[in-house]
Image (cartoon, rainbow, N blue to C red):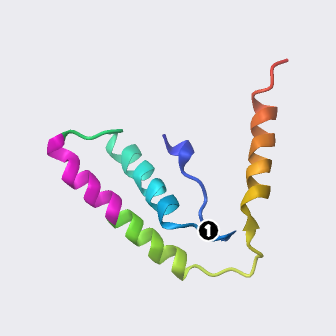
Amino acid sequence: MCRNIRPLYNFEPPADDDEIRAAALQFVRKVSGFSKPSQANQEAFDRAVDEIAHITHHLMDDLTTTAPAKDREVEAAKARARSAERYATA
């Protein structure tokens, strides 16, 4: 589950609301152990996702760096290359 959580900071363009919400959803799924909560737990689950997404927005806004922003396409290409090497058949 948590393999889907990707770094969101210091990218150009910056992480958008959908990316932040997706990361929050994956975090709550991992912590709760539910990929889809029961109706009895749905409200608490959704509230947790909303709160974590909100806090993540604050975190992204407050972090500072002098490093140049990373290019999403370049980082994705690197990840694909690592994956191809890792899963290559001999």
Query: Left of 14 or right of it: where is 60?
Result: left
Q: Residue at x 73, y 72 (%)?
A: 69
Given residues 80 and 1, the one toward you in this image is 80
Magenta region, main secondary structure: helix
Q: Residue at x 43, y 57 (%)?
A: 24
As helix, strand or loop, the secondary structure at mark 1 comes to loop
Magenta span includes 11: no
Q: Amino acid at mark 1?
A: Tyr
Q: Position of residue 33 (x, y in %)?
A: 34, 39
- Position of the C terminus, as image quadrant, is top right
Magenta span includes 46: yes
Q: Position of residue 64 (x, y in %)?
A: 63, 81
Q: Residue at x 33, y 63 (%)?
A: 50
How many dots with numbers? 1
For disc 1, the neighbor class at 10 Å (few under 14, some 14 to 19, many from 20) is some
Q: Does 90 sit above or below residue 51? A: above
Q: Which residues are magenta?
A: 39-50
Residue most extreme to the top:
90
Residue corresponding to mark 1: 9
Q: Does 56 sit above or below residue 19? A: below
Q: Position of residue 20 (x, y in %)?
A: 49, 62
Residue most extreme to the right:
90
Q: Residue at x 76, y 57 (%)?
A: 73
Query: Left of 32 or right of it: where is 59?
Result: right
Q: Position of residue 57 (x, y in %)?
A: 46, 73
Residue most extreme to the left:
40
